[in-house]
C-alpha cells in the first residue's frame, strides 16, 4: 500500500488550508525565523565585546536601507508570532472557545497596523 | 485505460439547440493495487442535475467509462463515513459534495491523506478503527436516554450514537498527521473527550491517562483543520482543547493533593 | 432512576505505556507561560533598546552607560533566559512532530537544554565584558 503521509510539505503547503491552518503555517515559519534571528542577533553582539571601533562600525552599517527592510520583516515576524501566540494561549487554556478565526483576524489586523507604524518610523529615522 | 473522454449521447446537444446538459472534467488520482506508479485520469462527466454529487460522478465513471476505478461508498447521505476523499484539495465526503458548489473548471479527486492508499480512492482506515477502540468501547453502552425503550428484534442492546462517523477526514486534514503516525490524532482524542464529558457511570481515568501521554492532546498545534474538515460537526479540535483543560485541572488537583498529604504528614 | 455503572475496559491502555502517569508532558504549558513572559519582555526590549534611541541603535559609549544600571541588566538577562527557553522549546515541538524514536527525542531534549545553558552563559559573559565586571 502506498503511504500518503507527505512529510514537511504537509505542514507548510497552504493549498486547501483554512484560516486556522494558515495561522499554523505562519506561526511555525515566523517562530523558526525569529529563532534564527535571535542567534544572529547574539552573534552580532560579539562586536560589543570587540570594543568601540567594531561596534560603532556595525551601528553605521545597520542604518543602511537593506538592514532597515530586514528590521521591518523582523518586527512583522515578532508581531505576528507574538499576537497569534496570545490567541493560541487563550484557546489552548480554554479561556476562549470557538472564536479562533475572529481572534486571528483581529490580532493580525493589529499586527499589520503596528508593523506599518514601525516601518514608517524606522525609515523616517534613517 | 488512461485518459478517456467519453461523451454520452445525452450530453451531445442537438444541432442548433442550446446544450441542455453541461459536462465537467473530473481528474481522478489513480493508484494501482499492485503498487505501480500513480497517475491522473481525466474523464468528462455529464452533469445531469444541479444536485449531482462527486460520488454520483464517480459512480457514473465506474458504470460508463472504467469499472476498474476503486471508490468506496455506502449510504449516500453522510452517515456511514466511507466515501471520504479530497476534492479540489479539500477533505470531504463525496456523497454530499455537489459539483455545482465547486469552483469552475476541472474537478480534482484524490484519496485521503495520511492513511495508506489501498487503491485509487480507497484508503485503509484500519489504524483509525484500532486507535478508536480503546476510546470508543465505552461509547457503545446502554443509554439512560431511552430508559424503558426496548431494542428492536435481533438487536441485543440499545447503543448510543455519537457525532463521529469515523470517516478519517480529520486525519487527512491534520498537519501534524503529515509527519507523525504516532500522534493519536483528532478522531481518537475527540472520542476520548466524549467519554470524559459524559462518563455515564464509567470511570474516565484510564481514557484520561491515555490522552495525557506523549502522543495525546498536548501534541495538537491548534490549526483546527480537523474541525473544518469534519462533515459531522463532531468538532475534534475543540474537544482536544476541552481535554487539555480537563487534564490540566486534574494535574493541578493532583499536585495540590500531594502537597496537602505532605503537609498533613509533617504535622 | 439509577445509572448502571459500567466498568471501563480499555484494551489499548497497555500500548500507551509512554503516556502513563508521571510522564505527563508539561511542555505546552511551559511554552504558553514563557510566551506570555517573552511577549512582555520583548516589548520592553524593543522600546528601551531601539524605539526610544534616536538612531535606533546605541553607539558603544551609550551601550556601556546604559548597562551601568542593574535594572537594565536584570531585565535584559531575564529576556535572554525566557526568549531562548521559549524559542528552543518551540524548536523541540517542531522536531518532535517528525515522530522520532523516544531515544532520539531524549537526545534532542538534552541537546536543546545544553544550547539553552550555553546561550544564557554567553549572555552573562557578554554583559560582564561590557559592564566591565572583569
Image: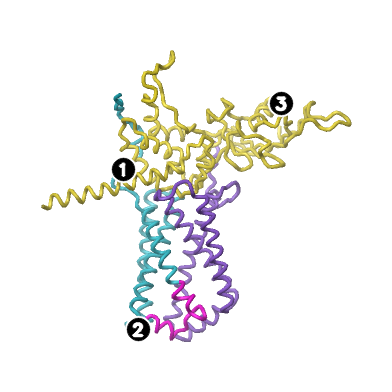
Magenta segment: C46-67
| Secondary structure beneath label 3 | helix
Question: Which residue lies under the disc numbered 1?
Answer: C20
C-alpha distance separating marks 2 and 3: 85 Å
* Distance between mark 3 and mark 1 Cα atoms: 54 Å
- Residue named by callout 3: B64
Tell me which residue sits at (38%, 65%) in the image: C82
Which residue was labeled with disc 2? C132
- Chain C tint in image: cyan
Colour used to depict chain A in the structure image: purple
For the residue pair C27 and C101, the one nearer the viewer reads as C27
Image x and y of residue B67, in percent: 67, 26
The residue positioned farthest toward the front in the image shown: C1
Which residue is nearer to you in this view: A50 or A29? A29
On whether residue B194 falls in the magenta region, the answer is no
Above/below status of A99 relative to B151: below
Taking the image as drawn, is residue B37 in sight?
no
Q: Pick the quarter of the image with the C terminus of chain A.
A: bottom right
- Give the mark nearer the N terminus: 1 vs 2: 1
Q: Could you tell me which quadrant the N terminus of chain A lies in?
A: top right
Amino acid at each position: 500500500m502506498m503511504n500518503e503521509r507527505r512529510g514537511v510539505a504537509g505542514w507548510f503547503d497552504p493549498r486547501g488550508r483554512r484560516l486556522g491552518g494558515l495561522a499554523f503555517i505562519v506561526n511555525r515559519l515566523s517562530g523558526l525565523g525569529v529563532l534564527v534571528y535571535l542567534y544572529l542577533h547574539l552573534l552580532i553582539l560579539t562586536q560589543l565585546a570587540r570594543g568601540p571601533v567594531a561596534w560603532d562600525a556595525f551601528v553605521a552599517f545597520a542604518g543602511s536601507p537593506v538592514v532597515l527592510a530586514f528590521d521591518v520583516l523582523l518586527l512583522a515576524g515578532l508581531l505576528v508570532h507574538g499576537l497569534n501566540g496570545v490567541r493560541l494561549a487563550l484557546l489552548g487554556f480554554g479561556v476562549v472557545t470557538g472564536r479562533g478565526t475572529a481572534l486571528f483576524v483581529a490580532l493580525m489586523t493589529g499586527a499589520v497596523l503596528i508593523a506599518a507604524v514601525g516601518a514608517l518610523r524606522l525609515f523616517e529615522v534613517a | 485505460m488512461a485518459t478517456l473522454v467519453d461523451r454520452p449521447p445525452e450530453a451531445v446537444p442537438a444541432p442548433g439547440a442550446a446544450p441542455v446538459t453541461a459536462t465537467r472534467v473530473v481528474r481522478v488520482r489513480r493508484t494501482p493495487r499492485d503498487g505501480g506508479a500513480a497517475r491522473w485520469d481525466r474523464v468528462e462527466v455529464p452533469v445531469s442535475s444541479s444536485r449531482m454529487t462527486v460520488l454520483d460522478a464517480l459512480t457514473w465513471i465506474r458504470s460508463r467509462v472504467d469499472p476498474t476505478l476503486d471508490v468506496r461508498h455506502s449510504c449516500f447521505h453522510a452517515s456511514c463515513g466511507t466515501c471520504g476523499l479530497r476534492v479540489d484539495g479539500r477533505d470531504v465526503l463525496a456523497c454530499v459534495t455537489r459539483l455545482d458548489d465547486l469552483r469552475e473548471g476541472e474537478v480534482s479527486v484524490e484519496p485521503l491523506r495520511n492513511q495508506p492508499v489501498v487503491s485509487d480512492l480507497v484508503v485503509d482506515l484500519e489504524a483509525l478503527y484500532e486507535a478508536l477502540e480503546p476510546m470508543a468501547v465505552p461509547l457503545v453502552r446502554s443509554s439512560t436516554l431511552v430508559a424503558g425503550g426496548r431494542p428492536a428484534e435481533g438487536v441485543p442492546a440499545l447503543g448510543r450514537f455519537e457525532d463521529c462517523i469515523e470517516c478519517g477526514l480529520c486525519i487527512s486534514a491534520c498537519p501534524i498527521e503529515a509527519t507523525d503516525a504516532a500522534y493519536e490524532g483528532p478522531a481518537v482524542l475527540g472520542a476520548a473527550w466524549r467519554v470524559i464529558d459524559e462518563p455515564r457511570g464509567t470511570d474516565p481515568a484510564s481514557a484520561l491517562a491515555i490522552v495525557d501521554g506523549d502522543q495525546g492532546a498536548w501534541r495538537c498545534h491548534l490549526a483546527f483543520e480537523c474541525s473544518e474538515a469534519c462533515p459531522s460537526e463532531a468538532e475534534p479540535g475543540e474537544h482536544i482543547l476541552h481535554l487539555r483543560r480537563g487534564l490540566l485541572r486534574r494535574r493541578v488537583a493532583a499536585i495540590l493533593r500531594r502537597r496537602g498529604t505532605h503537609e498533613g504528614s509533617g504535622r | 432512576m439509577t445509572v448502571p455503572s459500567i466498568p471501563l475496559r480499555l484494551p489499548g491502555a497497555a500500548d500507551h505505556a509512554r503516556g502513563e502517569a508521571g510522564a505527563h508532558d508539561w511542555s505546552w504549558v511551559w511554552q504558553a507561560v514563557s510566551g506570555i513572559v517573552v511577549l512582555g519582555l520583548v516589548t520592553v526590549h524593543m522600546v528601551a533598546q531601539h524605539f526610544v534611541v534616536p538612531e535606533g541603535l546605541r553607539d558603544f559609549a551609550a551601550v556601556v552607560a546604559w548597562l551601568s544600571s542593574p535594572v537594565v541588566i536584570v531585565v535584559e538577562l531575564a529576556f535572554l533566559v525566557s526568549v531562548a527557553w521559549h524559542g528552543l522549546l518551540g524548536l523541540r515541538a517542531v522536531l518532535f512532530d517528525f515522530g522520532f524514536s523516544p531515544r532520539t527525542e531524549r537526545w534532542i531534549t538534552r541537546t536543546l537544554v545544553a544550547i539553552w545553558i550555553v546561550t544564557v552563559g554567553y549572555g552573562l559573559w557578554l554583559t560582564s565584558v561590557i559592564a566591565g565586571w572583569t
